[in-house]
Amino acid sequence: MTPPTTPVRTPLPPSALPGLDLSDPATHARHDLSEIWRTLRAEDPVHLHRPAGGGPAFWVVTRFADATEVYRAPDRFTSARGNVLASLLQGGDSASGVMAAVTDGPRHRELRRVLLKAFSPRALTGVVEKVEKAGHDLVAAAVGRPECDFAEDVAGHLPLKAICDLLDVPEQDRAFLLRLTRTALSSDGPDQSPFDVWQARNDILAYFGELATSRRERPGTDAVSVLATAETEGRPLTMDEVVANCYSLILGGDETSRLSMIGAVLAFIEHPAQWRAFKNGEVSVDAAVDEVLRWTTPALHFGRTATADTLLNGVSIASGDIVTVWNASANRDESAFTDPDRFDLGRMPNKHLSFGHGPHYCVGAYLGRAEIAGLLKALREQVDRMELTGRPEPIYSSMLSGFSSLPVRLVA
Ligand code: HEM
């Protein structure tokens, strides 16, 4: 088949903004908003967005410097009432005060300290080795086939495997858990039944409840055991806290890493000279990983709630207002990155916001980077050329960005 031309999303002019709803997954699945972000950064960097079709207004922060100011100041901009538009617009997050990502202040610091223990270098060494080997084997199986769906056949297997290794989920439970997380989390399309999603989430929480109970009795060195046996302020975590934070590792680490791997291959196909430079060893794997993260920006936005009346870049924000930070725009801010619309694998420095910034900075950043690095090394060693053989399918989400399907041929 003739390879389709990308982009698969239609570019929209800045004049289209008043007709859009940035909280609607369809907006991001169908449209390329680069021009809108560029204009907002230049003319209205702290913009009050009134979604077309009604719904509460929210602030849209598009510049790198303003984004870091919001991320750095949980006392002014809290995560405790939700950290993504989906929960913020519904008035809060039920895991608030229990799950680190939606908790602030001293309790957040305690929960985060426990989570970081679960990511100790000792816990991670085996996980990283195994995920690198899995990446190598999956690429080997895909190379030479007339076509594969890189999203499904390669990237789809890696991050969840790493998280299951980190949590030491027994082998026999993994297919079951994979099915549940696909239903609970997937942003693949608009037609998920809300009941199935709710049911799958409950089943995951119940599964981790049982696992954590048994690990509390017979702890190992895995992340579930770390959480189940941790003490904060002189008492063990409640079972709700253990379960919610186990779940947050899947929530935070599966789709994000997967989308950056899929986006990396598409970027290599669209920028063959950069792929050649990487293949020939002209750029380091570490630098390439960071540029892949900046370029793909899997987490489009994160959100906060203003705790009091405050000023951001001279704009008055009222207590209780929803403030969204668009990483997708901040990572292309011309005042923070030279030539930001160039995919440049050797880019240095590259202080992107793909893992966030400040006190909620991604606890899985080391693992996420290691997973992507493993995959890039596997591609470099085994693949000479990559070709698109079908149309990439954008995911359906206002929070995450990337592709759920990427039909390609990998040529040795
Ligand atoms: C936090 C992105 C991988 C677990 C975050 C935040 C971002 C992010 C932007 C900040 C959220 C905020 O400020 O509200 C990513 C990306 C990844 C990735 C792009 C991969 C490419 C992972 C992995 C895990 C993970 C592999 C775990 C296995 C978490 C958790 C938090 C978090 C638990 C909350 C930390 C806190 O609130 O203190 N991530 N992440 N992430 N991430 Fe990741």
Image (cartoon, rainbow, N blue to C red):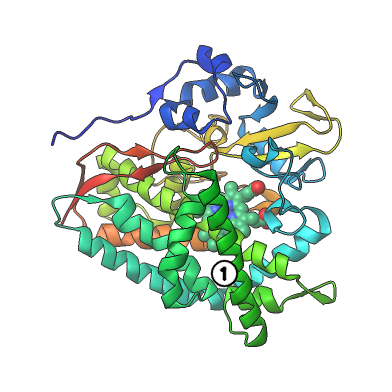
- Expressed as whole percent of the image width and height from the top left, the position of residue 27 reads 49, 27
- Expressed as whole percent of the image width and height from the top left, the position of residue 65 reads 66, 35
Label 1: few (<14), some (14–19) or many (≥20) C-alpha neighbours in 10 Å: some
Q: Which residue is mark 1?
A: 207
Quadrant occupied by the C terminus: bottom left
Indicate whether 160 appears above or below 168.
above
The residue closer to the viewer here, 367 or 284, is 367
Residue 382 in view of the camera: no
Q: Residue furthest bottom?
A: 218
Q: Residue furthest top?
A: 15
Identified at 55% across, 40% down, the residue is 399
For residue 244, what is the image quadrant? bottom right
- Expressed as whole percent of the image width and height from the top left, the position of residue 245 reads 65, 63
Identified at 31% across, 42% down, the residue is 266
Q: Residue furthest front?
A: 195
Indicate whether 219 appears above or below 83.
below
Provide the secondary structure element on which disc 1 rests.
Answer: helix
Left or right: residue 344 versus residue 177 is left
Indicate whether 156 appears above or below 55.
below
Residue 411 in view of the camera: yes
Quadrant occupied by the N terminus: top left
The residue closer to the viewer here, 371 or 94, is 94
Identified at 56% across, 62% down, the residue is 203
Left or right: residue 313 versus residue 165 is right
For residue 210, what is the image quadrant? bottom right
- Expressed as whole percent of the image width and height from the top left, the position of residue 372 reads 41, 57
**Quadrant in which ligand 1 is drawn:** bottom right
Identified at 43% across, 70% down, the residue is 174
For residue 308, what is the image quadrant? top right
Left or right: residue 341 versus residue 140 is right
Q: Is mark 1 within 8 Å of ligand 1?
A: no
Q: Amino acid at mark 1?
A: Tyr
